[in-house]
Image (cartoon, rainbow, N blue to C red):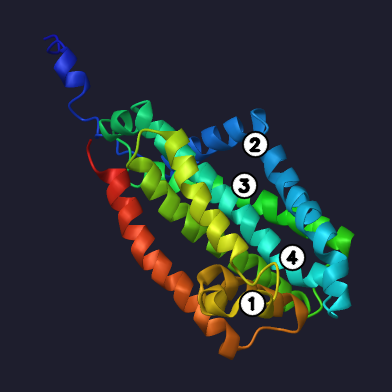
Amino acid sequence: MSAPATTAADLFTDVPPTRPNSFAQWRALTGRIVWVMATKGELVVAAITPLVFAVGFYLPLKFVMQVKGIHYAQYVMPIIVLQTMSFTMMSNAQLAAFETLTGLNMRMQTMPIGKLVPLLSRLSAGLVRSVTSLAAAIGWGYMIGFRFIAGPGQAVLFCAFSLLVGTVLAIGADGLGSLTKSPESLSQALTLPTLIFGMLSCGFVPEAGFPEWIRPFARNQPISQFSYALRDMAQGGVTWHVFWVPLVWLIGLAVVFLPMAVWASVRRS
């Protein structure tokens, strides 16, 4: 007696459904973004940008600060690092806005891709850019006289805190980028606060260099507080008395930015 014929339906009866691998998706999307950054020269720009800041700010103010007894390479290095992190922030914002503009976000929402994978892939690629900029900034800084005097432990803390600041800023920028379809307008909108908080900070000149009426803002705003902590990490070792204020600023910004970025990334247009 012959066996019953096998139908097409029988071939798929015992095949278990495949579940999407979020890790593989994240790796693929991150690799795609990093590859685009590498081939388009964005990582080269990330390495050159700190040099532009170092030359643009260190050379004009070096001799003025030396007269005041300030080792300006040590003093200005934190704000150079923070400025390079701001470029990662704007890069993430433009990438998120471009994916929204082209409909890529909407397309990925209709595919079996983890909801947070696109956001995490953009942030991971931004971290690659931040690491590139930070390594270049430290290299250029050593050429102008910057040193990690406080030792390797504080140097590691310096790098980790710098990357953490850059990541938190990138999270907020990514959220804004996912809510707009105009990368150009968003870039212009982010440039103004970046300039205001950067130039009106104690990262370039001491607090005494500002008019008295604006000193409270210059002293207490987050960029100044971040630069205080980074300067101490490089110079003599940061203490909790100095570190807790920038840490509170960073946690506060993360509490605001992270829910916004997650909601903006997973919402359906």
- Label 4, residues with CA under 10 Å away: few <14, some 14-19, many ≥20: many
Horizontal side of residue 193 vs 128, given as left or right = left
Distance (Cα) linking label 3 and label 1: 24 Å
- Label 3 element class: helix
Residue underneath mark 1: 228
Rendered image quadrant of residue 113: top left
Distance (Cα) linking label 2 and label 1: 29 Å
Q: Are marks 3 and 1 in contact (CB under 8 Å)?
A: no
Q: Are marks 4 and 3 in contact (CB under 8 Å)?
A: no
**Viewer-nearest residue: 117 or 187:** 187
Q: Is residue 17 above or below residue 48?
A: above
- Label 1 element class: helix
Horizontal side of residue 123 vs 57, given as left or right = left
- Label 3, residues with CA under 10 Å away: few <14, some 14-19, many ≥20: many
- Tell me the residue at 82%/72% (across/down): 65
Residue underneath mark 2: 42
Disc 2 marks a residue whose amino acid type is Glu
Distance (Cα) linking label 3 and label 2: 8 Å
Percent x, y for residue 43? 67, 40
Residue underneath mark 3: 129
**Viewer-nearest residue: 6 or 98:** 98
Percent x, y for residue 228? 64, 77
The answer to whether residue 147 shows anywhere in this view is: no
Disc 4 marks a residue whose amino acid type is Met
Dot in front, 4 or 2: 4
Residue underneath mark 4: 77
- Label 2 element class: helix
